[in-house]
């Protein structure tokens, strides 16, 4: 998943807590936060499922690709892009669309529309402004929180690169170090994913 589930949970709790009472009257904060998390994760899983589908498709053609010197990475990108266009999926990864953050602005906007629709139907809160005003405030809050996450992720990756010996990206050692340094970097920004 593009963002760790623990971070999505944190993000939704923070958005619930930070949204002004002039935008949203939160009656049951826990329920609102869980609702937001559910919508958020469902949207992020769309691209995860697509990636898995592309991997399975390419497995069937692995021998052909090897025999014809076709790059797996290039073929993955092409097939994924084609499926995204056919299915009209909003790409989640901001880095693939030129955005600085992990999550694209388009995906944040799509999620914000779905969040507002879910919040309008919920009995755990009540919108106090027009739905689009609430949506724009959610976009602002989500973006602010994601910018901190992006800094932490960049710090963790830079710390791995600063090791004297090269650690191959994607290796087990790299993943363990990234997880540890990422948690440390988040804590330096006041975010502790271990706390509920």
Image: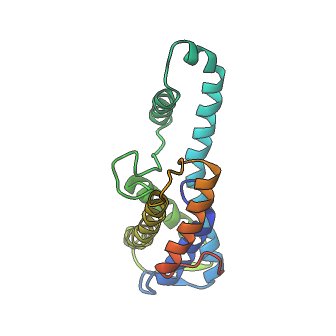
The image position of residue 62, as x and y in percent, is 62, 21
Which residue is depicted at the point 50% across and 82% down? Answer: 190
Could you tell whether 50 is left or right of 89 in the image?
A: right
Q: Residue furthest front?
A: 164
Choose between 91 and 56: the one closer to the eye: 56
Q: In which quarter of the image is the C terminus?
A: bottom right
- Position above or below: 12 against 117: below
- Position above or below: 31 against 99: below
Can the viewer see residue 42?
no
Which residue is depicted at the point 41% across and 52% down? Answer: 94
Which residue is depicted at the point 59% across and 63% down? Answer: 179
- Position above or below: 25 against 170: below
Which residue is depicted at the point 48% across and 64% down? Answer: 156
Can the viewer see residue 58?
yes
Could you tell whether 171 is left or right of 76 in the image?
A: right
The image position of residue 77, as x and y in percent, is 47, 33
- Position above or below: 123 against 149: below
Number of numbered tags placed on the structure image: 0
Choose between 95 and 176: the one closer to the eye: 176
The image position of residue 35, as x and y in percent, is 62, 69
Could you tell whether 46 is left or right of 146 in the image?
A: right
The image position of residue 55, as x and y in percent, is 61, 33
């Amino acid at each position: 998943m593009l963002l760790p589930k623990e971070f999505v949970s944190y993000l939704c709790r923070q958005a619930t807590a930070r949204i002004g009472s002039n935008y949203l009257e939160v009656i049951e904060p826990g329920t609102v936060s869980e609702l937001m998390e559910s919508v958020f994760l469902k949207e992020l899983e769309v691209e995860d499922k697509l990636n898995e589908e592309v991997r399975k498709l390419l497995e069937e053609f692995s021998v052909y690709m090897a025999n014809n010197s076709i790059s797996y990475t290039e073929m993955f990108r092409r097939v994924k892009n084609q499926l995204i266009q056919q299915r009209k999926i909003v790409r989640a990864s901001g880095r693939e669309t030129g955005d600085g953050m992990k999550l694209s602005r388009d995906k944040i906007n799509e999620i914000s529309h779905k969040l507002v629709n879910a919040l309008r139907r919920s009995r755990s809160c009540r919108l106090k402004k027009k739905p689009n005003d609430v949506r724009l405030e959610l976009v602002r809050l989500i973006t602010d929180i994601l910018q901190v996450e992006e800094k932490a992720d960049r710090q963790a990756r830079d710390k791995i690169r600063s090791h004297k010996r090269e650690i191959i990206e994607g290796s087990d050692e790299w993943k363990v170090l990234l997880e540890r340094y990422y948690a440390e970097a988040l804590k330096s920004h006041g975010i502790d994913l271990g706390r509920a």
